[in-house]
Amino acid sequence: SWFEVEVFLEITGRGYRVLPQFELAGYRIDLVVEGMKGRLAVECDGDAWHGSDTYLQDMQRQRKLERCGMDFWRIRGSTFYRDPSGALDELWGSLARRGIHPSGVNTETDEIDRPVNVSNRENSQPARPETTISVPVTQSSSREHLSDHDTEVRQIALSQSDTSEVALSKEESEVQSAFQDRFRSGLDPGGSSSLHAPERGIGSAHSVQVIYRNWLPRPLPDPRNARLDEVVDGLLEIIESEGPMVAYRAYSLYARAAEVQRVGSQIRNVFNNAIRKALRSGKIVAKNEHEKRDTSYLIVRGAETSPVVLRTRGDRLFDEIPPSEIGAAIIKILREEPQLSSDALIQRLADTFELGRVTVNMRSRLLTLRHQFGNL
């Protein structure tokens, strides 16, 4: 379609390598952007693309291809034609997080990741190292069997490689099972020991939702020349305050406090090493909710913090909300209104997390999470 052609020209105009009508597992993908370290499918949903049946079929196709290792980013024609340049802002961040860069970019020396700015951000969804909640609230992982994903609380393998496997922790699995039992019986997921006291009067469907508690910024040592233990201490302070949280948010908060403008590959490696050291020490625990091998995607929390805490969005971007936290909201809402339609559920979730306008990517991620958590 001409819409696909225009998106193709916008992406190639930035210097990226783009493969149109890419075939995978018997399906065709509109566009696939390829780099040295990864690839990303770009689906162009034009004006003729509409209707709940068509949408569900497309999401089913997407989930199948996700299980083949393909990540997706979607763009609606109406969104693109309103603002062709701004509509693709999220895409550039998604590509950078996956190590997909324009030709000629030296990723070893050029710090090209997103600027560090986490305060008072808009409700829009600038991409991050996501889950689309194509996740689970992930950016997409294979998620047909919710129960399997939701009961897996994993401890990161203590290797030095960023592609280390994730080992299942029996103790963490028991904690998560206990959380599910409490949630099904209508109790606060954090239990009486939760570090976040519930706010009352938020509404019957969200009565366990608590106010998001931000880390109080203070100057932190520059990660480029500080001792690793100093970086560990700074990240630990942030994680204990705001966890459970996605690790790359902790990186952004630390970098901003250290007056570092961008988190490039060198600094990200320092943060990843600090996270792994904190995991080895037992000071934090992590869950691989996004099912990715990149440490920056881990959901991390203090060792004494509840695995899941349903909170307001605060200043978090949509893709900074842990998939399990959105899943908790889905379970809570559907327990009270089991017959709620997908559109109505998405609106309730948008209200719960104060998302404002729900983008195509947000909707895709929320629907994937509904399939994951809707039967718990």
Image (tube, helix red, strand yellow):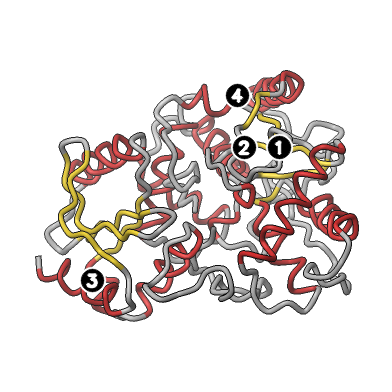
Tell me the crowding category of disc 4: few under 14, some 14 to 19, or many 20 or more residues within 10 angstroms, Cα based.
Answer: some
Marks 1/3: CA–CA distance: 41 Å
Find numbered disc 2 in the image and state the secondary structure of the residue it sits on: loop
Which residue occupies the foreground of this view, 12 or 340? Answer: 12
Front disc: 4 or 3: 3
Inter-mark Cα distance, 4 to 1? 24 Å
Q: Where residue 159 is drawn, which disc sits there? A: 1
Up-down: is 72 above or below 97? above
Say what secondary structure mark 3 lies in: helix
Residue under numbered circle 3: 7
Image depth: mark 1 or mark 3 in front: 1
Residue at the image point whose x is 39% and y is 32% from the top: 339
User: Is 371 placed left or right of 240 in the picture?
Assistant: left
| Residue at (87% x, 70% y) in the render | 221
Quadrant in the picture for the N terminus: bottom left
- How many marks on residues? 4
Q: Quadrant of residue 353?
A: bottom right
Q: Which residue was labeled with disc 2? A: 164
Residue 334 visible in rendering: yes
In this view, the residue in front, 232 or 327, is: 232
Location of residue 131 in the rendering, given as x and y in whole percent from the top left corner: 49, 50
Relative height, residue 336 to residue 226 (above, below) = above
* Label 4 close to label 3 by CB (< 8 Å): no
